[in-house]
Amino acid sequence: MKILLLYANSKSIQNNAIQWAPPYGLTCIASVLRREGHEVRLFDPSFCKSIASRVWHYVTDYQPDVIGVSIRNINSDSYPFQSFFGQIMDIIGSIKKAGRGLIVLGGAAFTLYPESLLKAAGVKYGIVGEGEKTFRDFAAHIARGEAPPENMPGLAISQDGGVRVNPPEVLAALEDFPAPAFDLIDYKRYMKKNCGASVQTKRGCAYECAYCDYPTFEGRRYRLIPAGEVVERMARMSAAGINRFFFVDSVFSFPPEHALAVCNEIVRRGLKIAWSAYANPRGASRELAEAMKRSGCARLDVTIDTASEKMLVNLRKGFTVAEIQAFDEIARAAALPAFYEVQLGGPGEDAKTLAETFKVLDSLRAWTGYIGAGFRVSPGTSLERKARDEGMKIEHDPRNPPTYFSKTLPEDFDGRVMEFCAEHPRWRSYLDDKSPVLKAIDFAVEKLGGDPFDYFWIYGRYRRFKHRLFGR
Ligand code: B12
Ligand code: SF4
């Protein structure tokens, strides 16, 4: 059977995000479908200017039997909020216009909002959660000319004016599935956009941060891919000229033994690569930090969210201020480029907790850091329950998802963030995102092939100068 896998991510979505992201999830599904004997093509319109007509032409030319559409992100997920809903609906509209192939929606954003997306797109089928097994079984039914069984785990189906969504099945062992089909992505082009090729060492996160929906996609149990297999995949990609990677694990550094095994294997195999990943201060050790550095860590996104003891408890982060400080010491000694991500405004945030956080941030030796504000309220999180208890009206509409801000935030909240950043040129915040000066610097750095965060200090010094001259 001919299957087209289409990434619903436009150039404008890519450009408006913090970084570019390739259709990695589709390559995981593609290798399974290929193994089943299907003819598979992947269309990634991320680099196209007029997407609607390109999509129409692609579908019309290829004449697929089934079209799997990957809806990875539907909104910016952070404040100031941006919705990608309209652009994604346009892409689906173009597929429908071509009038060929049974459409199936999937992907992380689809998993969060299956009802509203199926309804808005006017599509019958979708698949929530991990796609490898469910899409394989779905395709087998269609190839035999049968409708998929209505109770298939993970299937979302429009029926009787509503949408039925079956709970997904979490894959038991990741090793049972073949390596992602990396040949289907033009990773060299992504590297020019400062984006690393996606690679995964496990799925799952055992933490229970109050706002986080990652366990919705991957579950809470760690399912590890053996370090040897992870690095073998990287070695094959490296041999094909791909030397920059992003570990897309929810948290790469946990469990620490697995991260250490992966780093040591990269060093043992002598791969000359650079990589980035999300990390957690918990479980940090000198041994792991040094192994990370030796294996090519170019940036470690450490999602601390806050540096106030009270807020760490309220956000259920599972680590303490002392652990953040210990991590910072270790990272500094190993010369690891730590990028701290902070998110202010959670439950109980007030003038005192802000001051506590800024005081600790001031002492960290971050390579650079980002301060965001507000928390998107995701379905099924403990933040959702808290927000409802506080009387917030929650409707999970991807066009306008609810955002939580503590009611006890000081009136000049933005001003306090601005004051801190003005005196800390390494720190960027949501207030800088729209600055034309910063945009110009980022654009120039990217054109020269550099990482904009490496050069953020230029803008940071300009901002300090401006602040000292003109104040807020
Ligand atoms: C790593 C990551 C990043 C990295 C990616 C780096 C890289 N080189 O790949 C970076 C930091 C760049 C990033 C950026 C952003 N991200 Co991000 N990211 C993730 C993360 C943690 C993992 C993504 C991943 O690769 N997973 C592994 C693969 C295998 O899973 P997958 O893609 O979901 O695919 C599986 C299923 O979804 C399904 N599937 C996928 N497609 C299809 C299609 C069909 C037809 C079917 C049936 C199934 C199916 O099967 C796949 C295999 O099991 C997820 C959260 C998470 N834990 O999933 C957020 C996540 C995807 N990101 C999210 C967001 C919002 C963003 C940004 C918009 C943030 C911003 N403000 O800029 C940008 C957008 C980037 C872009 N240009 O498009 C959201 C999306 C939800 C939403 N609100 O719309 C998520 C879910 C996190 C969240 N907060 O909930 N991200
Ligand atoms: S924020 Fe990070 S550590 Fe916390 S639950 Fe989500 S993925 Fe896990």
Image (tube, grey):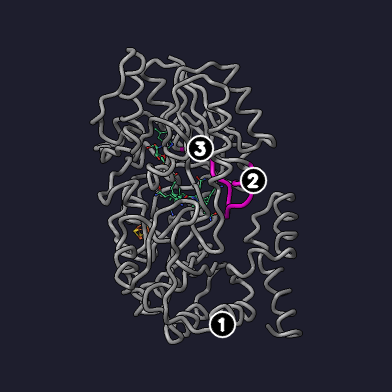
Q: Position of residue 437 (x, y in %)?
A: 74, 65
Circle nearer the viewer, 2 or 3: 2
Give the residue type at disc 1.
Answer: Arg
Sequence-wise, which precedes: disc 2 or disc 1?
Answer: 2
Give the residue type at disc 3.
Answer: Pro
Question: For mark 2, does the 10 Å Cα neighbourhood hold few (<14), some (14 to 19), or many (20 or more) residues?
Answer: some
Quadrant assignment for ligand 2: bottom left
Give the residue type at disc 2.
Answer: Ser
Q: Residue at x 51, y 37 (%)?
A: 23
Q: Which residue is mark 2?
A: 12
Mark 3 beta carbon near ligand 1 (under 8 Å):
yes
Question: For mark 1, does the 10 Å Cα neighbourhood hold few (<14), some (14 to 19), or many (20 or more) residues?
Answer: some
Verify CB contact (< 8 Å) between mark 2 and mark 1.
Answer: no
Q: Which residues are magenta?
A: 11-24
The residue lying toward the viewer, choosing from 12 and 316, is: 12
Q: Secondary structure at mark 3?
A: loop
The residue lying toward the viewer, choosing from 299 and 334, is: 299
Q: CA distance from mark 2 to mark 1?
A: 32 Å
Q: CA distance from mark 2 to mark 3?
A: 15 Å
Q: Quadrant of residue 282?
A: bottom left
Sequence-wise, which precedes: disc 2 or disc 3?
Answer: 2
Dot label at residue 416: 1
Sequence-wise, which precedes: disc 1 or disc 3?
Answer: 3
Q: Residue at x 38, y 55 (%)?
A: 251
Q: CA distance from mark 1 to mark 3?
A: 38 Å
Q: Secondary structure at mark 2?
A: helix
Q: Position of residue 263 (x, y in %)?
A: 42, 49
Q: Which residue is mark 3?
A: 23
Quadrant of the rendering where the N terminus is positioned: top left
